[in-house]
Amino acid sequence: MKFVKKHKYAFITASVFLVLFILAIFAMKSLLYPDDKKSIYGSRLDGIEDMEVSTKTINEIKSELKEEKFVLDVNYNLEGRRMNFIVSVELKTDLITAKTAGDIILENLTDEEKKYYDIQLYLKDNSEESVESLYPLIGYKHKTSVNFIW
């Protein structure tokens, strides 16, 4: 008790600085991250409930792609308003044949879905050697464009 009484002003000063330091941390957090409670997409996903692509459509796209001779595997991922298709192709598939995967995707989507979603198509092979490989190849279709851009 004697020590506390002797250093009373030091304890008061240290506690004031501690409170100010904690307040400064909260102020910096609110300055640097003002909307951390909001969605990362903001209002860009408004109305996505009305334009959801059914799992039936996605499964049809996957099955049609897998029916092609050059396709080994198909993966699908939806991120916001961007549809990602990752297609593994055989090692010696030429580019013109591989690019037909984009046409298969577009044939199975409605015009409204094509105008609402951006579509990315990743073509890759499963080779260990990347020296002579033509892949990976990425095709992108913006919602306002008609075809893929490679």
Image (cartoon, grey):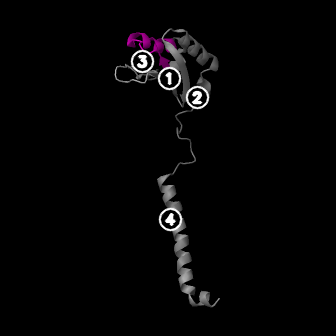
The CA span between labels 1 and 2 is 22 Å
Q: Position of residue 78 (x, y in %)?
A: 55, 28
Q: Residue placed farthest to the left in the image?
A: 131
Secondary structure at badge 3 equals loop
Q: Where is residue 45 in the image (x, y as percent from the top left)?
A: 55, 33
Residue occupied by mark 3: 148
Q: Which amino acid does label 3 sit on?
A: Phe
**The quadrant where residue 124 appears:** top left
The CA span between labels 2 and 3 is 22 Å
Residue occupied by mark 1: 86
The CA span between labels 3 and 1 is 14 Å
Q: Residue placed farthest to the front in the image?
A: 128
Disc 4 vs disc 1: which is toward the camera?
1
- Please tell me which of labels 4 and 1 falls first in the chain: 4
Q: Give the range drawn in magenta.
A: 87-105
Residue occupied by mark 4: 24
The CA span between labels 3 and 4 is 50 Å
Q: Which amino acid does label 4 sit on?
A: Ala
- Please tell me which of labels 2 and 3 falls first in the chain: 2
- Please tell me which of labels 3 and 4 falls first in the chain: 4
Instruction: Determine contact: label 2, label 3, CB under 8 Å.
Output: no
